[in-house]
Image (cartoon, rainbow, N blue to C red):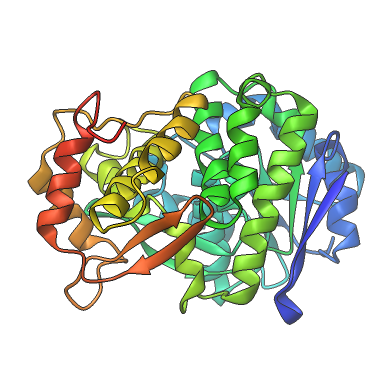
Amino acid sequence: MRTVQVELGDRSYPIYIGSGLLPEAGSYLEKHGLTKKSTHLIVTDEQVAARHLDTLRQSLESRGYSAVVSIVKSGETSKSLAVYEEVMTTAIQGGLDRSSGVLALGGGVVGDLAGFVAATYMRGVKFVQIPTTILAHDSSVGGKVAVNHPLAKNMIGAFHQPELVLYDTDTLQTLPPREVSAGLAEMVKHGLIRDADFAGWCRDHAPELLSLDREALAYGLERGCSIKADVVSADEREGGLRAILNLGHTIGHAIEAVGGYGEFLHGEAISIGMAGSALLAVKLGRDASIYPETVSMLQALKLPVVLPEHLSADELIAAMKHDKKFTEGTMVFIVPDKIGEVSIVKDIPEAFVREVIEELRRKEPEHV
């Protein structure tokens, strides 16, 4: 088992990564002091429930824990105020109190939704992340929890750190190829922002990662989580440095919103966004090699780098202006200076963004 510590003073917590952890979930809750006197809430989705819910419930029951369950539909559309209210209703009817905990069993959608419930139920209860996707190695770390508004992703949210993250790599073995690639987008992102060697490692070990090789996957998850943990530890509430974790997200979130939160997986949209940020870097005078290097890494992981024709530039730009990163009337982008280093750049001209959008539509962009 591998352990990564997120250092946040009295809010610090471990990320446990390894095989066979889910059947031991009850013992980990004991270790971290979650009470057995109160009822807890498990939030999961339909697909994950079918595969892993019984294992989690049996583990909790074997250790004397009781829990009610809220099962939501799979997919980004469950990150809504309507579904949030449904989960809250389950918590209230289930008799959760201030000593209860909310356990997120699933991917990023479930983690964000369950975390927002934990942050707001009785003004905050304990929270445990049990990710079951590769993508969730990013979303389960750092305490950002939220639901979407139809006009903008993650617009309604809070910061609420978990007590622990329990990452059983066995749960990843049944992921379909598309979700594997989407999850690896966030893994390589951590290398692109902070560790060029790791970004190169992701490209060079793409076959092993795509085939869910356990050793490669465990190392990639550990390194990705470590990079994010370092950034979050330095800037928990995104006062400055933490914004670098949003590489590709300005365009990516707009793609998700315009696509109705159903056309693209999060990692797919972020991949296109990272290609766009690399193009923007070249337009801003950075080394022209940044774009082809970035694209080669993304394509090695079978990720998209081309923007579909049917997405309107006007709608995408309008969506960017609803994004949290649009501040004081200016567009803010995370722009690579080189592979492994990025800058937070404000006042990006809209004309540059339009040029990037149009260039992203081409199957053979100029800079390849």
Residue 216 vertical position relative to residue 11 in the rendered view, above or below: above
Residue 51 vertical position relative to residue 58 in the rendered view, above or below: above
In percent of width and height, residue 60 lies at: 83, 45
In percent of width and height, residue 290 lies at: 40, 45
Q: Could you tell me which residue is drawn at 60 percent across and 63 percent down?
A: 142
Q: Quadrant of the C terminus?
A: top left
Q: How many numbered marks, from 0 up?
A: 0
Q: Quadrant of the N terminus?
A: top right
Taking the image as shown, residue 310 lies to the left or right of residue 163, namely left
Q: Could you tell me which residue is drawn at 28 percent across and 30 percent down?
A: 306
Taking the image as shown, residue 295 lies to the left or right of residue 45, namely left
Depth order, front residue of 352/66: 352
Depth order, front residue of 275/327: 275
Taking the image as shown, residue 56 lies to the left or right of residue 334, namely right
Q: Quadrant of residue 288?
A: top left
Depth order, front residue of 118/302: 302
Residue 310 seen: yes
Q: Could you tell me which residue is drawn at 52 percent across and 49 percent down?
A: 192
Depth order, front residue of 252/94: 252
Q: Quadrant of residue 93?
A: bottom right
Residue 260 vertical position relative to residue 145 in the rendered view, above or below: above
Q: Quadrant of residue 310?
A: top left
In percent of width and height, residue 204 lies at: 63, 29
Residue 54 seen: no
Q: Could you tell me which residue is drawn at 22 percent across and 65 percent down?
A: 331
Residue 207 vertical position relative to residue 105 in the rendered view, above or below: above
In percent of width and height, residue 189 lies at: 51, 47
